[in-house]
Amino acid sequence: MSWRTASWVAAVVVAAAAFVYGALDEGPPKTNADRVRALAEDFACPVCAGQSVAESDVPVAREIRRQMAVWVDEGRSDAFIRDRLVAAYDVDIDYNPSGSGITGLVWVLPVLAGGGIAAVVVGMLRSDRRPARDTPQPPTAVRRRRRNAAVWTVAVVVVAGAAGLLVARSSGSRGSDGSITGEIRATTRELIFEAQSRLGEGDIEGAIAAYDEALELQPSSAEALTYRGWLTSRRGDPDTAVVYLDDAIAVDPAYPDARLFRAIVALDQGDGSGAASELAVFDSLDPPPYAEDLLAQARVRERVTEARHAAVLQVVDGLAAIGERPAFGETALGVDDALVAAEALAARGDLLDAVQFLDWVLESRPDDPDVLAGRGWLLVRSGDPELLALGVEHLDAALDADPASPAGLVYRAFARWQQGDDSGAGADLAAFDALQYRPPDLVRLVEDQGLRGAISG
Amino acid sequence: MNSRGRDRRRRSLWIALPVAVAAAALVAVLATRDSAFERKASSPILGGLAPPVVGMTVTGEPFDLDDWRGRWVVVNFFQSTCVPCIMEHPELVEFDERHSAAGDARIVSVVFDDTVENVREFFAAHGGDWPVVAAGASRAAVAYGVTGVPESYLVAPSGVAVWKQLGGVTADGIDDVIARLSAAP
Amino acid sequence: MSNVAVGSAAVSAGLGAALLGLVATGAGIAGRLRHWMRYARQLTFMMAGAVVVAVIVMERALITRDFTVKFVAEHGSSATPPLFNVATLWSALEGSILLWALVLCGYAAAVAVKFRGHRPAARRGIGRDDPENGLEVRGHRPGDPMVAWAMLVMFAVSAFFLALMVGPADPFIGVEVPPGYDGPGPNPLLQNHILMAFHPPILYLGYVGFTVPFAFAVAALATGRLGEGWLAATRRWTVAAWGFLTFGIVLGAWWSYETLGWGGYWAWDPVENASLLPWLTGTAYLHSVMVQERRGMLRVWNLSLVVATFSLTILGTFLTRSGVLASVHSFTESGIGPAVLGFFAVIVAVSLALIAWRGDQLRTPGRIAAPVSREGAFLANNALFAAFAFVVLLGTVFPLLVEAFDGRTVSVGNPYFDRMTRPIGFALLLLMAVAPMLPWGSEGRRPPTELLARRLVAPMWIAAAALVSSVVAGARGWAALLAFGLGGFAGGAALRQILLAVRRHRWRGLVGRTNGGMIVHLGVVLVAVAFAASQSYVRQAEFDLEVGRRATFAGHEVVYLGSAVVLHDNRTERVAFVRVDDAKTYGPAIATYPFASQTIGIPSVRSTLRDDVALSVLTFPDEPGPDRVILRVTVQPLVAWLWLGGIVMAAGTLLSLLPSRSKRRAPAEAAASEAPA
C-alpha cells in the first residue's frame, strides 16, 4: 500500500466516521419555537404577495404563527396543522404542493426532466465512442440505432416517471406523525405525563426535572408552569412559585389548576384577599372534578373564609374598641364586608354580637335586602325555634324589600323547611331557580345541604 | 446542400419545435392570467358548521359560541387600532340594539392581534356591551380563515356559517342577509 | 423648461435614435446603404446621451422635489433622506424601466466603442485568418456584418424599452398638485436600508449585461459565422454581467435579511427566482463555453444557453412587473405586462427560428473522447444547471399552469424548492471538487483516475477536517454535514489550484479566467456552507421582556434596557435598547411612516463570523406597568459567510477579467488549467 493509498484510506475513514457520528447522533432537540418557525416557512401568508407566514409581519401572519404555536404546544402533528389551515384558508396556503392529481406533476416533471437530461448526457458520451457519424453507415445499422434509441427513450421515461411518482408520493404530503419539521422526540405532553407519573411515585425532584425539560421545549406551557410552580412551593419556596404561577396565569387565564395553586400559595403567604379573588375566578371556570377534589383536600374554601373572617374581625374589633362607634355609613366597610363580619362573629360564637352588628348596619341601610337576609340567616341557623321564627320575619322583610333577593329566597327556603313547611320552601326554591342570576355560593349551599332532596323527600 | 445537411437541419427542427411549442404554451398561459392582486372573497368554511369560538372574554367570563345555538350570531373579528373597525362599530352597536330585546340575533367580537387593554378602552370609548373574546381568539381567527380586519361571519341558528363579509358591515346589511336567508327554506 | 418637457423630449429623442439606428444598421446589413453604418455608432451615443439626460432630469426632479412630475408626486417626498431620494428612481415601475434603459444604452454605447474596429478575436488568436469563424480580421470596418447585426439587436432591444417609456411606463407625466403638496415617499421598506441604493442597479447591470452576448449570438446565427469568434468577443462581457448578477443577488439577499427581520434571506419568491434563473443558465454557459472553445463542441447548446439567459431576464421582468405572480417585489399593476410578454415571445420565436435555420451548420464533428475528462465534467455541470433551472422555472410558473388547466389555485414554495434543489446542490459541490482536477480528454498523459487520486488527497483531508470540526462544534444531521463535507472537498480543490498557480506565477496566479474562476468557486463554497448551516441550525424565539429582564437563548443572553422614541424626517421610530451578551447595545425598532398604514419593523443584527443574533421588535404592548417589549431573537450560525462569499465571488469575477499570463504566451493554453505538478 503506497503512502497515497494509505492517506486516502485514512482521510475517508476520518470523514466517514465524523459524518456517520454526526448523522446518527440526534443532537439537541428541536424546541417548539423552532418547529413553529419551520412550519411557518412552509405556509403562505394569505394576504401577502409571495411571503410566507414566517416572513410576513401583517396581523394575520402573526395570528397564524400564534395559533401554530398553540397547536405545536398541544403536540399536534404537521398533518393536523396543515389540515386545519387548509380547511380555513384553502389549499393555496400550503406551499407544499400535493403529490396527487395534476399538482403531482410539479414533483414528477423535474425527475422526468432530470432523467431525460441524464440520458442525453450519457448518450452523448456513449455515441462519441462509436465511429464518427461522418463515415457512411449501412442502413441496417441506422435502423438498429433508431430502435435502440426508441427502447432507451421508453426505458428512461418509465424509470424516471416511476421515480418521479415516488418523489411525489413521499414529498407531496405531510406524514401524520409530523416529519417535515423534524423529529419530535418528546412532546411537551409526554414530558408532562412523565412528570405526573414521577409525582405519583413521590419523586418530586424527578418531576421538577421533567417539568423543566418540558418548559425548555415550550416555555409557554401553562400546565408545566403551573405544576413547576406548585412543586416549588411544596419545596418551601413560595416566592419563586408565585413567579411560575403568575406566568402560567398570563399564558392561560382560564386554566383552573393555576388559579387553584395560586390561591393556595397566596394563603400560605397570608394573602387572604388574593386567595379569595383567585378562588372566585376558579369557581367561574367550571373546574373539572379532580380540581374540586384538590380544593376540598387542601381546605381552600375554608381557609379562604377563615382568612377573610380574620381580616374583617380585625376591623370590627377595632371598631368595637373605639368608644363612640361611628355610623356604618361612615366607615370604609361595604355590605359584603359587614355580612362576612357577621358570619365571622357568629363563627366565633358571638351570635348576639353578630346580630347586633347587623342591626348597627341596618341603622345606616334600613332596607338593604342582603343585610336583612343575612341577619335572618344568622337566626335561622341558631337551631333555636324562637330565633328561627324571628329569623323568618327578618327574611320576610328582606323579601319585602326585594322580592327577587336570591339570598332571601334561599335562606327562607331553608327556614321554612326547618319549620316543616316543605311547600313554602319549595316555592322559594322555585322562585330562586327562576332568577336570571344565581350566585354560585348560594347554588353550592343548596347543593351541599341537599335541600332539594330534603324537600321532595 | 447535401443530404447530411438536410438530416441535421431536420434534427435541429425536431429539437426546436417542442421548445417552441412549450414556449408558446407558456406565453399563452401567462397572457391569459388575471392579476394576482385580485382577492377572493369566498371562504371554504361557508356552508359548513361554523368553527368553534371558545375562550375567555375581556371581562374574564368564559364564552362558547355553541351556547348561542338557536340564534343568529354575528362573529366579528376586529382590532382596536384599525380605522375601518372603528367606522364599522356604530353599525354593530345599532344591530345589537335592534335585536337585544328579542334576543334573536347576537354579536360576539373576537380580538384580532391586539391587547386586552386596548380592547377595553375601545369598547369604553365606542360603546357596545356584547362579549369580546380575547383568550382563544387566535384559534377562532385561524379556524375561520380570517385574513384581515374587520371581517365578519354570520352563523345561522342551525350553527352553520352562512355568510362572510370582508371589511365593515352595516346593521341593515346584516339584517338583509338574515331576512333573505330566513325566507329561503 | 420644465422637467416633464425635458424628460419627455429626452426619452423621445432616445427612442428616435434607437429607431434610426435600427434603420441604419438594417440598411447597412442589407447592403444597400453601407455608409449608413457609419452613423450607427453616433446614434448609439445619441441614444445613450438622451437616456442619461432623462435620468439626470428625473434625479433632479426627485432631489428638488418637483411634484409636477407625476412619478415624483407619487413616489417622492420632501422627508426622504438624500441617498434614498436618489434611489427612489428604482423604487417604482417607471423609474426602474428608466434605469434599465440607462444601463442598456450604456452597454450599447460601450459595445459601439469596443467594436469600432479593434480586432479582439484576432488578438486572442481565436479564429485568426478565419473569416468564417472570427470577427473581421483585417480590420477596421465598422461595417463588419457581425458587429452590425449585434448593434441591430442592441438597437432593437433599446427601442423596445424606450418605447415602453413613451407608452405604458412613461416616467415623465405632468400633474397639477395643490400648493404645499408633499408626496408619500417610496415604500417604507425601500427606504430604510443602504443596500437598497446598490442592490437594484447592480442587479440591472447583471440582467441587462446579458443583452450583449445575446446580441452577438443572434449576429452569429444571422451571419452564419458560428465558430468561436462571437464567444471570444463577448467572453468578458458575459463574465462581467454574470459577476454583477451574482453580486446583485447576494446584495438582495443581504437586504432582505437586514430589513425583513425574520432571519431569512432567500424565500423562493417569484422575483427572487426570476433573478436566479438567468444566473443558473448564465453559469452553465460560462462553463460550457470552455468546451466549445477547446473542442468546438456544444455550439447549439451554447447559443441556446445565451438565448435562454436573455429570454429569462425578460421573462423575469414580465413576472416582476405584470402582477401575474404575487410577490413582495412586484410593483402595483401596470400596463407593461402584455408588451413585455410579447417581446419575450418575439425573442424566443426569432431565436428558435434562427437556430433551426442554422441547424445544419451548428453540428460539429467534435467528440468527447472520455467520460472522465474535463469536458465530461462540464457536460455534467451543464446537465445539473439545466435541471436546476427547470426545477426553479417549473416551481415558479406551476401555480399559473394549474390555474389555467383547472382553475384551482395552488402554491409552490419553500418545501418544494428545498427538496428538489438540495440534491442538485450536493452534486454540483461534488463536481466542483472533481472537475478542476480533470484533464481535457485529449491530454492522455495518465489515466484520469490516477490523476484524481493524486490531486484530490489534500481536498479529501480538508473535507475530513471540515466534517470533524463541524461535528465537534455540534453540527448534527446528515444533510448539513454532507454540505459541509462536500464544501470542504470543493473548497480544498479550489484552494489547491489557487496555491499551485500562485506558487508558479506569483500574483499572476490569481488573475485570469481559470484562477479567478477558482476564487469564485471558493466564494460559492462559502455561500453553500453558510446556506446549509443557517438553514439547518437556525433558532428562533419570542420573548416578552420587562425593562431590566434578561433572556437566555441558544447560548446568547439579551437584556432589555428600555425604549425611546426617535423622530426622523421621514419616520418616527420607537427603539428598543437591547444588550447582547453583556457587550454592545443594539437598537431594533418599530417605525411609523406617515403615509403607510402599517408599522415597519427595523431589525438589528449582531453579526460575527460564528453566528448572528438578529433582534426584531414585534410590538411594544403599551399596557399599564413597566415598559415591555415583545422581542424576536433569531440565532443563526455562519450567516456572515453568505455576504463574505458574495464578496469573494465578486472579487474572483474581477480577477478573472484581468488578462492572465498564459494567455499572452499561448492562446491555446488559455483554457488549460492544470499544470504538471
Image (tube, coloured by chain):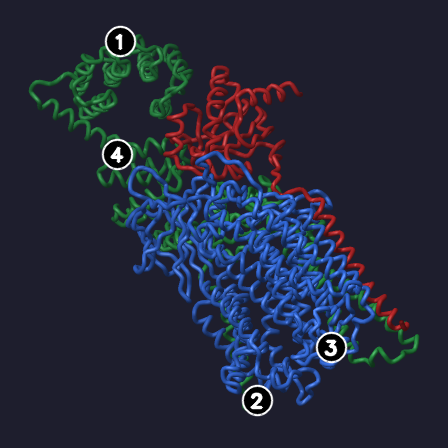
* Disc 3 chain ID: C
Q: Reading the chain from its start, which is encountered first: label 1 or label 4?
A: 4
Comparing A188 with C74, the one in front is C74
Q: Tell me the CA gap for discs 2 and 3.
A: 28 Å
Return the residue at label 3. Answer: C296
Going by the numbered disc 2, the residue's amino acid type is Ala
Within 10 Å of disc 4 (Cα), the crowding (few <14, some 14-19, many 20+) is: some
Return the residue at label 2. Answer: C677
Co-location on one chain, circles 1 and 4: yes
Q: Is residue C365 above or below residue B165?
A: below
Q: Tell me the CA gap for discs 1 and 4.
A: 32 Å
> Where, quadrant-wise, is the C terminus of chain C in this rendering?
bottom right
- In the picture, which chain is red? B
Q: Which mark is residue A303?
A: 4
Q: Quadrant of residue C384?
A: bottom right
Is label 2 or label 1 in front? Answer: 2
Comparing B130 with B30, the one in front is B30
Any part of residue C278 in sight: yes
Is label 4 or label 2 in front? Answer: 2
Return the residue at label 1. Answer: A393
Q: Which mark is residue A175?
A: none
- In the picture, which chain is blue? C
